[in-house]
Amino acid sequence: MKPPCKECDPLWREEFSVRKAGEAYVARCQFTKFLTLTSLGMFVGNLWILAKSFVSRQVSYPEQAIANLGEIPVGGVKVFQYPNPGEQCLLIRTGADEYAAYSQKCTHLSCAVYYSAENNRIECPCHEGYFSIRDGSVLQGPPTRPLPRVVLTRRNGQLIALGMDAEPES
Amino acid sequence: MDPSLPHRRRGLTAINGAMALVVVLVITQVWLLSATLDSFLAGRRSAALPGAIFSGLLFLGCGALYLFILRIERQARKEEREKP
Ligand code: FES
């Protein structure tokens, strides 16, 4: 057997670079490395949300006439598509001179919601999620986010959609 | 730390402590990410910036603890090699 060499490591040390006693260190070190990379991944996720929030701030919605005033009766509903074709929204006449409009897509799992005139609220048939007609906030059920509201204005006897507002009015 | 403990045991205790801290930081970051995403989807964009800043700080904390663990591990291996 060759005498131990001071300058160079023997072959076995190259191939089994960790002594058994040092295994605990290496295992913990690698696990912490994995956790740190997970942490980096989540930081990147947060940066992505930040970037998205800057980009979506600049989204502009089209102005679109959605109904004539008085076209629907009190308690009546009209379905329209806004802001893009295929994105269904509900226009609800809640009083003689009051209208509200919301996206028809439930914020839980995207079922189509409907207006329940007898309970005066918006209901989702899938998991019984209920939304307030006043501001779209969640009254009951699994949804955690309010229904996106369509911002309305009146012009020349018409109701005009100006944009979407995902936050309930305070 | 008890100075009577052998050096290896003390190193391991320090690594265990740092690792537990990293686990806590990562769990906090998971919660932060889900809360920020939830409020972003709800249209509250104001939460995105503080969320990203805190997440960055937590990541820096994890990185610092990882470097600390790496240093202890290197030291231990060096001592191991220097053993006759
Ligand atoms: S999809 Fe509407 S409550 Fe679940």
Image: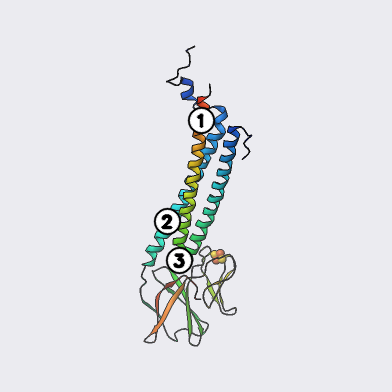
The crowd level at tag 1 (other Cα within 10 Å; few <14, some 14-19, many 20+) is: many
Answer above or below: position of B75 versus A59: above
Residue A150, quarter of picture: bottom left
Do we see residue B67 in this rendering?
yes
Residue B84 x %, y %:
53, 21
Report the amino acid beneath label 3: Ser
Which is more toward the observer, A158 or B38?
B38
Residue at mark 2 shares a chain with residue at mark 1: no
The crowd level at tag 3 (other Cα within 10 Å; few <14, some 14-19, many 20+) is: few
Disc on res. B77: 1
Q: Secondary structure at mark 2?
A: helix
Disc on res. A94: none
Q: Identify the chain of the residue marked 3, using the numbered disc in the image.
A: B
How far is the residue under mark 3 from the one under mark 1? 48 Å
Q: Identify the chain of the residue marked 2, using the numbered disc in the image.
A: A
Disc on res. B46: 3
Residue at mark 3 shares a chain with residue at mark 1: yes
Do we see residue A33 in this rendering?
no
Q: Number of numbered discs present?
A: 3
Front position among marks 3 and 1:
1
Report the amino acid beneath label 2: Leu
Residue A130 x %, y %:
57, 71
Identify the residue under disc 2. Answer: A47
Which is more toward the observer, B84 or A75?
B84
Q: At x 54% / y 36%, what residue is drawn? A: A27
Q: Secondary structure at mark 3?
A: helix
CB of mark 1 near ligand 1 (< 8 Å): no
